[in-house]
Amino acid sequence: MCQKLQVSRASYYRWLNPCPELSEAQALRRRRKELVHTEFEASNQVAGAGQLVDLIRNNPEEEIPKSTVLSIMKDLGIQAKRMSAFNTTTMRDHQARTAHIKNRTVDELGRRDFRSSRPGAKLVGYITYLRTGEGSPYLATVIDLSSRQIAGWSMGENMQTRLVIDAMEMAASRGFICSGSVFHSDRETQYTSDAFQAWCAEQAAGQSSPANTDRCQTMKLPFTEATEPYGTSTLVHIKMPPAWSDLSAQWSSLQDSEEGTKLR
């Protein structure tokens, strides 16, 4: 029978009388499988073989070759999830009429100055998107630089001009936009559209934007008192959404306030 099956007699007898204890190689394989599976789940199933090798190297007592990790992943039937591509939110209209839009967030020395002495004087806005289990809705926000509050926001399935106007209208309804307010943004098509410029003109609010915004701009927002105008500050990328916990906290505080009661 061994000749017919082309197996050695030793293999046949090992199969017929299996050893109750794992061999050293089998025990090593099992331990490595558990380690690969643990690291894979800890990465939310997005780490590939190369990343798993690097993660396992954090434990000085373990080092698994990439070929072995690939073999174990095949045995376990697991593979890394592919991350979806980023949605493009920065699109510039080079034909838009923007000659009158200047950068109003610089001081007399040309240094960026995002300080604001009173609510409603200076605001910033951006568009981003949120990944959810049911899609990636777009989010437009308006932030007051004096209070650091989210003065207005709007969500939608597309990022047409109406999205940013709705966010601005919420900020205006809460008293953050009035005559003389300065709204700073990049030069995305929504913010340079005729409809948005007309809305700002109706509110007597001035638009502000860096001269060159082909790439997303970075703003330096000082988080110090007015007596320390150029002290410790935090770099904030205007294309990155604030932490969801911050949004929740802002919304909760709004609901608890008298103003929030009126909105409800």
Image (spheres, rainbow, N blue to C red):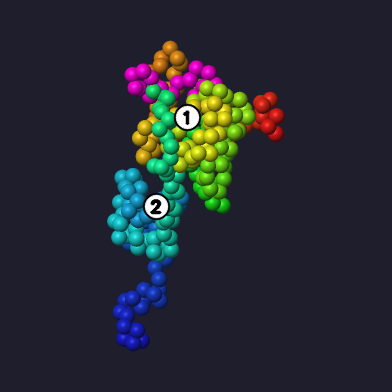
Foreground residue among 161 and 27: 161
114 in magenta: yes
Query: The residue under label 1 is which amino acid type?
Result: Gln
- Look at the numbered disc 2 and give the secondary structure of its residue: loop
146 in magenta: no
- Viewer-nearest of discs 1 and 2: 1
- Look at the numbered disc 1 and give the secondary structure of its residue: strand
Foreground residue among 263 and 107: 107
Horizontal and vertical percent position of residue 67: 30, 60
SS assignment for the magenta stretch, majority: loop
Q: Residue at x 45, y 21 (%)?
A: 115
Upstream in the sequence, badge 1 or badge 2? 2
| Number of marks in picture | 2
Q: In the rendered image, which residue does mark 1 sit on?
A: 207
- Considering only vertical position in the picture, is 78 above or below 192? below
Q: Residue at x 39, y 42 (%)?
A: 94
Query: Bounds of the magenta span?
Result: 107-123
Q: Quadrant of the N terminus?
A: bottom left
Query: The residue under label 2 is which amino acid type?
Result: Ala
Q: Quadrant of the C terminus?
A: top right
In the rendered structure, the answer to whether residue 233 lies left or right of residue 153 reads: left
Foreground residue among 249 and 40: 249
**Which mark, by number, is residue 47?**
2
In the rendered structure, the answer to whether residue 150 lies left or right of residue 16 reads: right
